[in-house]
């Protein structure tokens, strides 16, 4: 008895230590310079929690746990090394999905044991199953949209809102059957296993229906939202297993994900309810076409403008990540600074395909954090810059958000690149961005389009400075 009490004290103390490391690691993730250390501390906390749980429960052999940990570590290392930065959003979506799938399996295993469970345990088990299934299938759809396996645009159809409402009603009914597990209804025998698998199928279908109507421009919001879902699913699984550290870790992920989602929604002037319930409302489609004259410019001619510029603001987007142009841009930055020009980078909160995407990309090229400015800060003085260089960005610099009330992105805060004295847009062609709408910036009188691969264009400008 005394030995059991001592073991429980040691285990709970270790859980408290792990929780403290989680919180401290989360705080360090708030700044790029300390993010790597925060990630390491959080991973260490999870390792400690897993090890101590093994000694606590002893559900399976240590050999099986060790094999699973080694296999997972190898996959993680290979993914971190081999996945390109442009594919990182897709990887994050898959990781969110795997977290949801793990919670779904925990819920399934809790029921599959056949032991009699309390009503509270049945409720939280159903929540773990539901949220885990939604997270898994929703993350797969987000991955398919981001990797262009399916269209990135909003997928809607007639009767979608009614179908989703019927789906929710069915989930509520099945959830009641799942929790109460009645022996019979209206004289029919109900097999609990059948209810379990129906609930799993409905959860997976609901995740698909939730993410399909969300367009590509809202993908950064979806990623952070699904991350929150994975945490909430883990928290519910922790209650089902009576595991304190899983409850704490899941709560931290869920809460931080919701906060980040809210920040992303504000950055895009979207309401959280609009993102959460987009499948339950009619989605407006815009047929607005912007017409005008495009004025192309060669990299050689752009050099002469840059040579005379005293200030340059760089606005990166996902296209820069695709072209891997961040290193060439860093070289050009150094050349401009040697020529006496001020160089700043304007970072929109949802630039790229996930929060912080551009910050990480520029950090790869050793761009100092002192050169990075948030949207609100740069907009206050954007009109004073001689040149605004838009590299692979589209929706985040679209003036239609300010000027065109009929635009789907009207009201979305954007970087006012068009207010700079000169605007260079580095782009392969005239294709629209994630939102699928035209950009009037391309036709502004002070805008010049520099078509071609961004990396090659920037390298050509660097060579001009070197000659």
Image: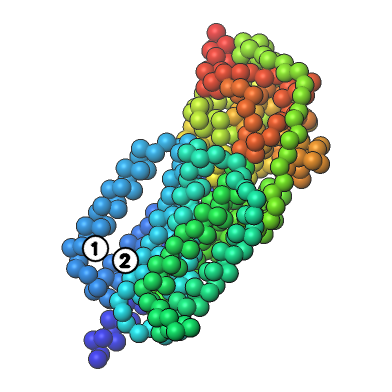
Q: Quadrant of the N terminus?
A: bottom left
In the image, residue 3 lies at what x, y percent? 23, 86
Relative to residue 307, is residue 192 drawn left or right?
A: left
Residues at marks 1 and 2, CA–CA distance in whole angstroms: 9 Å
In the image, residue 378 lies at what x, y percent? 71, 38
Question: CB atoms at circles 1 and 2 under 8 Å apart?
Answer: yes
Q: Establish if 139 lies above or below 147.
A: below
Query: Which residue appears farthest toward the front when viewing the image?
Result: 187
What secondary structure is marked by label 1? helix
Relative to residue 395, is residue 78 drawn left or right?
A: left
What secondary structure is marked by label 2? helix
Q: Establish if 60 lies above or below 204.
A: below
Q: Establish if 410 lies above or below 419.
A: below
Query: Which residue appears farthest toward the top when viewing the image?
Result: 467
- The residue carrying mark 2 is 50
Q: Establish if 235 lies above or below 311.
A: below
Relative to residue 72, is residue 220 drawn left or right?
A: right
Task: For residue 93, say whether it is visible.
Answer: no
The residue shown at (65%, 50%) is 158
The residue shown at (59%, 45%) is 155
Q: How many marks?
A: 2
Give the class, few, some or many, for how many residues have Cα within 10 Å of label 1's Cα (few <14, many ≥20): some
Give the class, few, some or many, for how many residues have Cα within 10 Å of label 2's Cα (few <14, many ≥20): some
Label 1 or label 2, whichever comes before in sequence order? 2
Which image quadrant for residue 192? Answer: bottom left
The residue shown at (31%, 47%) is 75
- The residue carrying mark 1 is 65
Which image quadrant for residue 458? Answer: top right
Q: Quadrant of the C terminus?
A: top right
């Amino acid at each position: 008895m005394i030995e059991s009490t001592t073991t429980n004290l040691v285990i709970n103390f270790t859980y408290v230590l792990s929780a403290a490391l989680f919180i401290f690691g989360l705080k360090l993730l708030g700044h790029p310079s300390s993010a790597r250390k925060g990630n390491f501390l959080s991973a260490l906390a999870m390792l400690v929690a897993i090890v101590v749980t093994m000694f606590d429960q002893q559900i399976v052999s240590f050999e099986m746990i060790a094999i699973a940990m080694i296999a997972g570590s190898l996959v993680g290392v290979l993914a971190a090394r081999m996945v390109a930065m442009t594919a990182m959003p897709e990887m994050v979506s898959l990781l969110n999905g795997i977290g949801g799938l793990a919670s779904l399996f925990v819920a399934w295993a809790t029921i599959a044991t056949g032991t009699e469970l309390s009503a509270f345990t049945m409720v939280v088990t159903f929540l773990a199953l539901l949220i885990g299934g939604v997270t898994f299938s929703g993350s797969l759809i987000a991955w398919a949209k981001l990797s262009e396996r399916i269209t990135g645009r909003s997928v809607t159809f007639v009767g979608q809102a009614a179908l989703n409402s019927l789906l929710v009603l069915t989930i509520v009914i099945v959830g009641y059957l799942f929790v109460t597990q009645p022996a019979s209804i209206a004289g029919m025998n109900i097999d609990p296993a059948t209810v379990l698998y129906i609930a799993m199928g409905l959860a997976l279908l609901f995740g698909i229906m939730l993410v399909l109507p969300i367009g590509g421009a809202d993908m950064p919001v979806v990623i952070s939202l699904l991350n929150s879902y994975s945490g909430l699913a883990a928290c519910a699984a922790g209650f089902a297993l009576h595991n304190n550290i899983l409850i704490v870790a899941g709560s931290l992920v869920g809460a931080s994900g919701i906060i980040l989602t809210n920040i992303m929604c504000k950055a895009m002037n979207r309401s959280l309810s609009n993102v959460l319930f987009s499948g339950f409302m009619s989605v407006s489609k815009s047929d607005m076409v912007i017409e005008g004259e495009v004025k192309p410019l060669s990299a050689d001619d752009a050099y002469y403008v840059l040579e005379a510029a005293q200030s340059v603001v760089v606005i990166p987007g996902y296209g820069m990540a695709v072209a891997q142009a961040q290193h060439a841009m860093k070289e050009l930055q150094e050349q401009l600074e040697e020529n006496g020009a001020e160089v700043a980078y304007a970072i929109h909160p949802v630039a790229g395909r996930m929060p912080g995407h551009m910050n990480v990309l520029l950090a790869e090229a050793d761009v100092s954090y002192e050169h990075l400015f948030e949207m609100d800060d740069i907009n206050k003085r954007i009109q004073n810059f001689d040149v605004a260089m838009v590299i692979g960005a589209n929706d985040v610099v679209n003036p239609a958000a300010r000027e065109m009330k009929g635009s789907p992105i009207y009201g979305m805060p954007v970087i006012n690149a068009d207010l700079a004295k000169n605007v260079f847009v580095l782009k392969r062609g005239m294709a629209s961005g994630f939102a699928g709408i035209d950009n009037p910036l391309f036709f502004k009188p002070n805008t010049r389009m520099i078509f071609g691969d961004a990396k090659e264009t920037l390298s050509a400008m660097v060579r001009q400075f070197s000659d």
